[in-house]
Image (spheres, grey):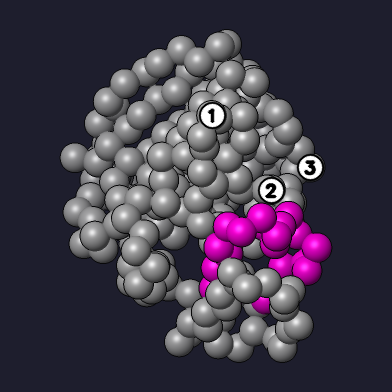
Amino acid sequence: MKNITEINVTLKAAISLDGKIATASGKSKWITGEKARREVHELRNKNDAILVGINTVLADDPQLNVRNIIDGESPIRIVLDSNARIPRQSQVFKNDGVPVIIFKGNKARRKVWPKLSNLEIIEAPSETPEILWVLSELRKFGIKNLLVEGGSIIHASFLKSHCVNNIALFIAPKIIGGQDSLSWCGNLNIGNLEKILQTEIISITPVGKDFLVLVKFK
C-alpha cells in the first residue's frame, strides 16, 4: 500500500482473539490488560498526533493523552466529526495545552464550540471529510507521524484510501464472538480474495498476557 501523503500513518486497535473491539452492546473496557494499555501510551508518545472518529468519542469519551510515561508528551488530538455531534464536555477538550483539531462536514449543524485557544475547527469541502484531504490539511500543522485509534469505520476509511503504513494490533487471548460484535475494521467492499489487502507481519511481542502484532503493507 503506497502512501503518497508524506505522513506516516499507523492504525492501532486493541482486539480479542477473534478480532473484536467491543461486544454487541458496545462494551469494550478492558479487552487488553494493563501492560498492553501502558504500551499504547508509549505508542502515543512516539506520534505527533492521534486521530479518532466521532463514534469513538461518543462511546468511550477517551482522553487521547499520554499517561504514566516519564517525560511523555501528549500528541495533538484529532476528531473526525462530520455532523458536529461532539459534546462540549468531551475529554478531548481538556484544557491542558495540547492542540485539538476537529474536522467537520460542510453541512454540519451550527455549534457553539468550547473557548480554547488551542482548538482548530476545520470545515471540509464535502459532507464527510475525505481521508486524503484530511491528511493534506494535517501536513500544514507539521504532523509527520499519525496514530489512528479508530473506530471500525475510520480504520476502514484509511485502508480504502491507501494511506496506511503500519498496523499495531494488541491482541488479548479472549473470544467475544457474535455477528453483531464490532470488529476492528469496517467494510472494505472486498468481493473476492484477489482484491484482499496484502500485509507482512513484522513482529509478535508478548505484552503481559496479551500480544502486540506489528504489521506493515507490502
Q: Amino acid at mark 3?
A: Ser
**How crowded is the residue under tag 2: few (<14 C-alpha within 10 Å), some, or many (20+)?**
few
191 sits to left or right of 60: left
Distance, label 1 to label 2, CA atoms, is 21 Å
Q: Residue at x 29, y 27 (%)?
A: 201
Quadrant of the rendered image containing residue 182: top right
> Residue under circle 1?
70
Q: Residue at x 51, y 34 (%)?
A: 71
Distance, label 2 to label 3, CA atoms, is 18 Å
**How crowded is the residue under tag 3: few (<14 C-alpha within 10 Å), some, or many (20+)?**
few
Residue 70, image x and y in percent? 53, 29
Callout 1–callout 2 Cβ contact below 8 Å? no
Callout 1–callout 3 Cβ contact below 8 Å? no
Asked if residue 41 shows in the view, the reply is: yes
Q: Residue at x 55, y 87 (%)?
A: 106
Give the structural element (helix, strand or loop) at label 3. loop
Residue range in magenta is 84-104
| Residue at the farthest front position | 71
Instruction: Please tell me whether residue 217 belongs to the stretch shown in magenta.
Output: no
Q: Name which of mark 1 and mark 2 comes first in the sequence.
A: 2
> Residue under circle 3?
25
Q: Amino acid at mark 2?
A: Pro
Q: Main secondary structure of the magenta part?
A: loop
Which mark lies nearer to you, 1 or 2?
Answer: 1
> Residue under circle 2?
62
